[in-house]
Amino acid sequence: MGSGIRDKVVILGMGCSKFGERFDIGSDELLLEAFQECLNDAGIEKKDLQAAWLGSALDEINIGKSATRVAGTLHLPNIPVTRVENFCASGTEAFRGACYGVASGVYEIAIAMGVEKLKDTGYAGLPNSPAFGQKYVLTCPNISAPGMFAQLATAYSMKYGIPMERVKEAITHVSWKSHQNGAKNPKAHLRKAVSKEQIAGSPSIAYPLGLFDCCGVSDGCAMAVVTTPEVFKKLKPNQDAVKVKALQIAASSGEEEFTNRWDGCTIKSASIASQRAYDEAGIKDPRKEISMMEVHDCFSITELVTMEDLHISARGQAIDDVLNGFFDLDGGGIPCQVDGGLKCFGHPIGASGLRMLYEMYSQLLRRHPEDRLVKDARIGLTHNMGGFPNHNLVSVAIVGLD
Amino acid sequence: MIGICAYGGYVPRHRLNRMAIFGAMGWMNPVLIVHATGEKAVANFDEDSITLATAAGINCMEGFERERLDGVYFASTTAPFRERQNSVIMAGALCAREDVRTADFAGSLRSGTSALLSAIEAVGFNGGGPVLVSAADCRLGKSASVQEMYFGDAGASVLVGSENVIAEFKGSCSLAEDFVDHVRGSNSRFDRQWEERWIRDLGYNKFIPEAVQRLCQKFEMTPQDFEKIVYPCYMPSARRQIVKMLEIDPAVEQDGLQTVVGDTGSAQPLLMLGMALEEAEPGDKLLVIGYGNGCDALYFEVTEEIKKLKHRKRVSRSLAARQELDNYQKMLVWRDMIPADIGARGEEDLMMRWSLEWRHHNAVLGLQGSKCEVCGEQQFPPQLICANSECGAIDQRTPVNLSLGGGKIFTYTSDLLAASVNPPSFYGSIEFDGGGRAMMDFTDCTQEELVVGKRVKFTFRIQRYDSRRDLPIYFWKAIPIEEEVF
């Protein structure tokens, strides 16, 4: 085993565009919004960047393959620019690339970028594409993302003998809480607090999920400049260092999809990735030590089961934690989706992982107004999940102050 | 002895009350009221003549080893492919051997009985293994046409062989006449017919009695010698006249299923024959007539073996499994007769990569998975390396045809976002009997019928239709069932 990433890399600066249905602008302008903020925050110039990683997922309606067009848009000074794609973890994957570049000693300053222009799709939801390969198309039913994730609820209700009404009550709270948080966030896509009645009564998308159980499909861009602790100290002697504590990815082995071993309502790769991340970061009791989280709430039910997969809630207990307000901003537990989450901040696939880190970074540096701040935040966790519950990959990142 | 060893039928679940058609289109053609009695069987949105024929074939082969089939014949006037053999697709879905003889019969509503005669000849000549004959049709009449009223969709099958014969073939005669009562050019979707009085008086009422007489002459018999006479004809007045002309007891005439299924074209004589065999007794003489551009007349005598055939009510059981199609417009959308907006999501192009499909054609056509030779676990699609993490055996597997068994529902959803001409899209994870899981579409069901743990059977269906290239793409779906069928 290697020694891990813990404390080897520091975030020097971050930027994040406003997320939303940005019909008036494209990837170029989204990149510019985040890039300017990011360089200003880092206090460096473009010429100081030594390498770049870029995450984007749906290249066919976005920036195309490679990152050459993005390098051309930002007119980066002939530095190595690598596009990475790992479904919804693409942004975190770009961050991982930049961090490993710095931690290896090859570069002192690297940038991770994530951008996605989804609102050129022409219809609601994610575009229909052979994203799992042509072979999968041969035997694949007529699916959509909400339908694939909705089945977590069928299985959860069955496994724990919990009536679907009770599951619905909990996932309604999940979405309600994210709307409460998103309403306070000027950069979020959906900025309206909504009542639980509105959420529970919203039109069905895929049983048992309704419209308000699904996250926004948005345009957006987020970035991070990372460096070594030494360079950080030199450049920003008066700022708290937000250090990278853990970066983990786990991909399904196929056992869940092809065998009878899976219970249908746990994300095995999340359970594995998070445990590895806790080990890497030296966290013994995540329920006590994690200050706040941004998780992959593509659907409300995903967030619910993720609370168990991250070893925060005991198996079968997430509903109680959710309904007791444990994940609410002022619930006295671990605030989750403090910026509104995918649900309300929005979900431009390639940018989401970096957007989550942007929120953790902003919280740790206490840059938000008082009503949005997580009290005594020291350790933040981010989580992305790409693919479907029965076959996926999960990334877990932990950042924090010493 | 050569003859019929088994029979089967498949009537699609949806039935449309003909008054619903009249209610929608009677304003245009008030005379339609004459035909607006009873209901017609309507293929589901994911069915066509290949899938109907396959379902009937599966039904017919219950209790028989499909591996033994030496021939698979498909008969239809609505074959989905002009090039790409339709019977080969059916043989693949039936998991027949690779060296099976396949052939398509087409061009006439008589193609069902023509295929049956060819199968009899093949078994007679080769003295060999059984040949499955499956006929199906999904003919289209234009909206507000008489044909739309009386056509129905169904498949019917007969297994022909030389062992365990339940109805011995005694002989046949044929008539070939270029009598153009119906016509469709090679680019026409809709049936065109000549004046109904002419069709009745110089068609049905002339050729059918003539075919019966010729056969009787050949075998020195009279029409009264038969316990059942099976002939397709949708017109009640023509049927009354034929009974009169043949001087037979009306009970000898096999019911034409017109008020419960409709005229199913190539499948009709075989579907009616199946109904006749359900009730037949040893010693019964049956006369079966295929009609279309002349006639085929086939003479069978039922044997003692029929008592040993399990599950005799094969066609009527399928007939009884019905659900009312709640509106006429659904049928128009399913048959692509009115342009319906399924959303831009449904317009994304997924061209079939045929070289890829060929590499996986056993999995696609036969729902063939793999069984690990080391740990014994089943997996679908076939896995090069066993997915059981405690095993992980590399390249040690045998094929297993999962469509032969059933499964049960593990998870499900009802999806309104996925583009479909029949929303919502029902799908979920199913567990195969003997292990392994797959995410599959559910069909022929309502959301209420989807329950975790419920049994499913598998059905070969159109997985998607490539409208740009006019190609149906097939795969298997799951149907929730109340109890084990057979």
Image (cartoon, rainbow, N blue to C red):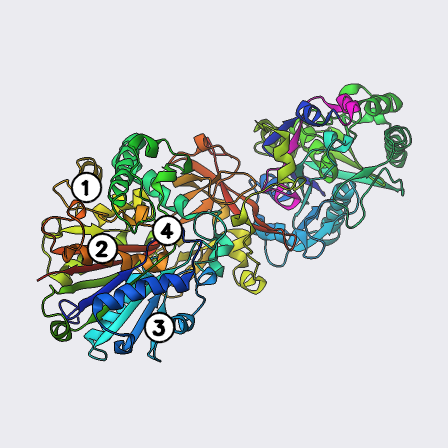
Image location (x, y in percent) of residue B422: 55, 38
Secondary structure, mark 3, is: strand
Among numbered discs 2 and 3, the one appearing first in the sequence: 3
Q: Is residue B431 above or below residue A222?
A: above
Q: Is residue B245 visible?
A: yes
What's the chain of the residue with tag 2?
A: A
Q: Is residue A386 above or below residue A102?
A: above
Image location (x, y in percent) of residue B282: 69, 29
Q: Which residues are magenta?
A: B28-52
What's the chain of the residue with tag 1?
A: A
Residue at mark 2: A359
Among numbered discs 4 and 2, the one appearing first in the sequence: 4
- Label 4 environment density (alpha carbons within 10 Å; few <14, some 14–19, many ≥20): many
Q: CA distance from mark 3 to mark 1?
A: 37 Å
Image location (x, y in percent) of residue B343: 54, 45
A170 sits to left or right of A390: left
Residue at mark 4: A20
Image location (x, y in percent) of residue B464: 56, 49
Q: CA distance from mark 4 to mark 2?
A: 16 Å
Mark number, residue A328:
1
Q: CA distance from mark 2 to mark 3?
A: 24 Å
What's the chain of the residue with tag 4?
A: A
Secondary structure, mark 1, is: loop
